[in-house]
Every structure is written in C-alpha cells, then in structure tokens.
Image: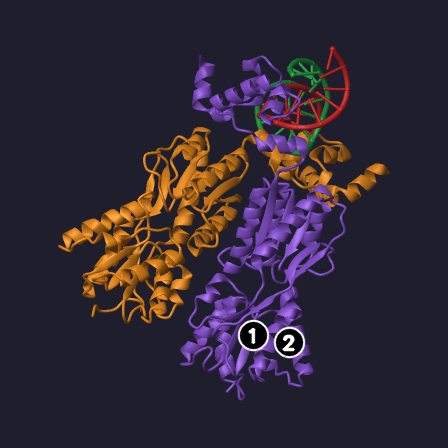
Chain colours: A orange, B purple, C red, D green
Amino acid sequence: MSDAIETQVRPGRVTLQQIAEDLGVSTATVSLALRSSPLVAEATRERVQVLARKLGYVYNRSAASLRTARTHMVAVGVNDVVNPYFGEILAAIEETLAGSGHTVLLGTYSDDPVKQDRVLATLKEYRPDGMILCPANGSSGEALSSIAAAGIPIVQITREIEGVGLDVVASDDVAATRIALDHLHDLGHRRIAIVGGTDEMSTGRNRRIAYRAWMREKGLAVDPQAMVVGLGTRDTGFRAIQHLLDLAAPPTACICMNDLIAFGVMMGLRHRGREAGRDFSVVGADDVSEAALWAPGLTTVKNHQTEMGRRACERVLVRTVNPALPATRIIIPPTLVVRGSTSRAP
Amino acid sequence: MSDAIETQVRPGRVTLQQIAEDLGVSTATVSLALRSSPLVAEATRERVQVLARKLGYVYNRSAASLRTARTHMVAVGVNDVVNPYFGEILAAIEETLAGSGHTVLLGTYSDDPVKQDRVLATLKEYRPDGMILCPANGSSGEALSSIAAAGIPIVQITREIEGVGLDVVASDDVAATRIALDHLHDLGHRRIAIVGGTDEMSTGRNRRIAYRAWMREKGLAVDPQAMVVGLGTRDTGFRAIQHLLDLAAPPTACICMNDLIAFGVMMGLRHRGREAGRDFSVVGADDVSEAALWAPGLTTVKNHQTEMGRRACERVLVRTVNPALPATRIIIPPTLVVRGSTSRAP
DNA sequence: CTGAAAGCGCTAACAT
DNA sequence: ATGTTAGCGCTTTCAG
C-alpha cells in the first residue's frame, strides 16, 4: 500500500531493482531487457519494458557512468555564447553530438584564463567522454594538459595552444589573411590596416605574422600604427577605426580578426560620416549570418563554423574509442565572400 | 612498480581509496579532508590535499551523485542558441549558475516538439538538479509534467505552457504589445500590422489577443490580413512585409514578435526600395544587442533577457532546496526603447 | 535465456 | 578526530 503510494508520488525513484522484484526476475535481466539486448527473450523484454513505462522508470546515468566509465557527455568550453561565431559553432556541436547520443556540458569563460581554468577543472570532474575547447586568450596549455593527462580526449577548436600535442580543428589563419589582403590589393588598396587579434593567441599571432609577411612581399611598408591590437568585439572595431582615421596617412582599407570587429568598424565609420564600401573598405572574418544582413553587406572570409563544429565532434568521438591515436590538425580552408563593404581604392 | 606507472600514466584513475591507503587513513577521512570539513584535523587535511594534488586526483561527480542524489547540473533547453535572444538568456543562465557551483547541461530542439521530447527525455536521465526550459512551439505539457513528476524542478522561461502548474519566468506579453502599439499610435499610425507568433504558443497567443483587444479599444478595424502568423525568424519578417505592402490598403507600421522578425522586415523594406523609419515604421521585441546597431536603429520592446535568466536560476535553485514550494509566475515588465525605425505616420 | 554476485567511487551514519 | 560499514543504481562476468 505504502509502496503503491511511493510509486505514484515519486516515480523518479523507480530502479531496476524494483522492476526486477515486481517481475520476479533479476536486475541483470531487466538491465539487458531495457537495452533490448538479444540475450533476453522477446517476451521478457516486452514485459520489462511495459512495466518500466508504467512505473515511470528513468534510467540513471550517474549510476551507469560509475559502472561503465562513460558519461556520454562532451564538455564544450567557449568564451562567450552570445558571440554568433561561437554560437554557430556551439549549435553545430550540439546538433552533431545529439545525433550520436551525446549531450553537451557547457562552460564559458569570457577569454579569461583564470576563469577558464576554474571552469575546466569543474567540467573535468563530470568525467565527460571528451572535451571540445576554444582556449581563452592568453591561457597556457597547463589546464588542457592536465585534462588530457586525466585521460579525457580534448579537441581544440578555432584556436590552438601550440606544443600541447592535442587535436586541433581550425581555419587556416594565414590563408584567411592572405585572401582578404589579396582581395583589397586587387581593388587597388595599398594602405591597409589590420584590426584585432593579440599575440597571446594563435589566431591573432598567425594573422599578424601573415599580414607582415604579405606586406613585405608586396613591397609595402608596415606601419605599426596600422596594426591595432584587441579582442574580437564590436567595441574594438569602433575604437580602432577612430584611431586609424586620425593617422597622418590613414589607411583606405582594413582587414579584421572577425566579423564583430568589422561591424564595429562600419559603425565607427558611420559615426564619422563615412560609409563602408564607399569611403573605406572593410573585410571581416568568419561570415556569421549577420554579415549578409548589414547594409552594405560585409565582405568577409568564411571560416565554416558549422563544419568545424562537426569535425571537432567526429574527432573527439573517434578518440573516445581509440585514445591512443596521434594528435591531428584539421585545417579547414577559408573562402572569400565578396559583398558591398569593399570597393576600388580612391 | 607497476602501480607507480599506473599512477603516472593514468592519474585519472586516482581514487579516494588510493589516497587513503597511501596515507594510512580511511576513505571517509579523505573525503572529509578534501572538502575541508572541520571534522578533520588541520594537519590531516593538509596531508590529504597535498597528496591528492600530487597524484592528480580528480573528484568523480558521477560517484558522488549516485550517493547524494545531487548532480549540481542544471539542464537548459532552448530552441536555438544562434538566435541572439536565446543566446543572451543562455549566457545569463550559464554565468549565474557557475557562480553557485552549478554546470549547464544543454539541449536544443529548434521549435520541434518531437525533438524536444527526445531531448528532454535524455536530459532527464542525467538527473539534473533542475531544468530551465523554453518550450517548443506547439509542444504539449506532457513532457514537462513527466519530468516534474520525476521530482526534477522545472522553470519555464520566456514561454509558458499553461495549466501544467510549473514555475514561469517571462516577460509581460500583453504589456509589451500595448507599449509598442501605443508608441505607434502616438506617432499617428492607424493601420498597424502584427507580424509573427502563432496561436500554438503562449507568447504568440497572448500578443495576438492583446493586439485585437487594443485595436478594438482604439476603435480600429482588425484586418486578418494584417495579422501575419510565423515563427520568430528573419525570413518570417522578410516575407511578411512583401505580403503587407501588396495589400489593397497597406499598413503604415507593424509590430513584430521579436527583433529577428523586425530585422527581416527592415531588409524586406529595403528590398522594395523603402526604408524603415522613413517609409514605414517597425517595432521589434526583445532588444537583442544587434538592435542598436542597425541603421536605422530598431525601436523595440526590451524584454530583459539577462534578468530573466538570472531569475530563472534563482528560482530553480530555490526549488532544489525546497521542492514543495508552490509554483510562481515571475513576470518582468518590458520597457520601450525608441530608435530610428519608427517615425510619424505619413 | 536467466540469476547471483561483485564492484564502479563516493558519502553518511554510526561507532570508537 | 578517525574508522567501519553500508549502499546509492547500474553493468558485467560467470554459472547454470
């Protein structure tokens, strides 16, 4: 009687044990039956599944995980989910993982290495089957190494801490930079600035190096004033363009670390009575969906977020099965998308 | 010897047990020491913590959860993380929860009730301490009820399935609608359309009802053609405005279910050679950060995503401690933000 | 095809 | 202040 009430009131408490007792079989049989194992008789399976449904049985993954050392969770660490670039990556990851029966455990750390270490330490305790991380700007490889040492596969996405020997799925920063610069060069621009990125992170470093090399190749002088450091925010772009327009010989175009910076630049131009594409050429990076919607549309370098997310999932799941695999670097070639924000140099 | 290698190679395998043995104390003591319990001697605590760090011990939350029936995870279910509205809510939730030692388990379902049920069923198996959900368009309360019945606290956010008797944190749809309409009315508009929303979801239903009521109050005729049904996407807005402009007596303004729709309307206007704010007035809803950046800026009704996220967390955590609390509805008053997309009627 | 038994790693009574 | 013991709910040999 009191049992019946228990069952009614807190069906969350139904366990394999109870089903087994009710049916007069063992928990082992119930466990197999619920997973439709061929080891168990058709009729038994049916009886078990029917009763389980009736009692409102809910599989307890904590218990299963303890036993199997598999959680079917993948931890995802990004800086900021509001940034559409990360949003798009996260969405692709979530969808891909859901398709293979995995669930996303989310952590964010706003490009703060200290916060990142705290967040990753917590995520690690949940023993996810793997982690997909975009390292915070300026973070060292220690946190990542310690997780990898604990036997959790890690895939770095977008950015990369070099030398930790972990898988990477990223865009080709050098190619992205050169494509953007070539496009501007073809349009006749010669005084070209680069906005955003820091030398504390692979993406920024690589692009800044690529920028210098490209300028030298073209026989153009590198003006340090035209290399504006900053995180990937609209604010960075807004401020940068004010600074650039005030230079003695202002640039006629700029390439940006990401689209958000480029949006900031376009706003900043408008603030000064100029228009992107008419008075100044702007190239973004990422091609977030908003890029197509600006007026003028943003010319940008597509970084294939969705594919990156998908590939990162594949990689982390493969490693789940075979942890001894050597680390690979999957570099996705970027592509130029020309819209209205760039035009012939004056 | 082989033990030492084990420890080196897979420190992930270090357990309380091992630390206890190495130190010649019991696992209970180690457990307490690691949590800095006052029950354990200062010196012991120190020894334990030092060794734990040295061995690379990682707390196993699956094991702890099995024992304590607490996971410190909160499941968050939204339709789409790329939508900045949900992105902002998710970011607020993640940050608030991290502050109280909880981690987000993420699920998305693209406004698909079937997918939602599948996702929620999975999330439930992880036994999160609570769930914060924005129900999919057209979903019934069954999935939610079954989770609540399993003893997991649920807070509905933004949208609400009525009659399930669960906590809600949402914006005041009626007030939001009236604020927007009043603003347009003050500007002299009389033929005002409403774009987006469906009667399958509380938010849409409430707004459409509020719209009809308001029109009647003002003695204005309700043209069914001027009430365009649709999900909250840019595409909905783009199509809707084409339709509206083709009506015999086209409206001079519209209110939108959300900002994305409003962006779509503004694009659609441009597509027809018109400009929002000059030829047609548009009011959005939500005030996502992009709204301020359009040219013209979008006049919109702020729905306070960040506060909603925060309040939802508070509520779910309270319920964690005291599950018997009666369900509450926390309704956050919306506020109008006037920018350039609205102007005097012609 | 099914059952018995052990144990994953942790915590909480209870005992000392 | 520390140890002993039991057990959370599940899966997995191993027997039968």
Residue at numbered disc 1: B255
Q: Quadrant of the N terminus of chain B?
A: top left
* Picture layout, residue A325 above or below residue C16: below
Which residue reaches farthest left?
A: A219
Horizontal side, residue A61 vs residue A266: left or right? right
Which residue reaches farthest bottom?
A: B248
Tally of numbered discs = 2
A247, B91: nearer the viewer: A247
* Picture layout, residue B100 above or below residue B337: above
- Give the quarter of the image for residue B103: top right
The amino acid beneath tag 1 is Ile
B286, B333: nearer the viewer: B333
Which residue reaches farthest right?
A: A1
Contact between marks 2 and 1 (CB within 8 A): the answer is yes
* Picture layout, residue A338 above or below residue B35: below
- Give the quarter of the image for residue A282: bottom left
The amino acid beneath tag 2 is Tyr
Where does the image place residue A95, in percent across and percent down from the top left? 49, 51
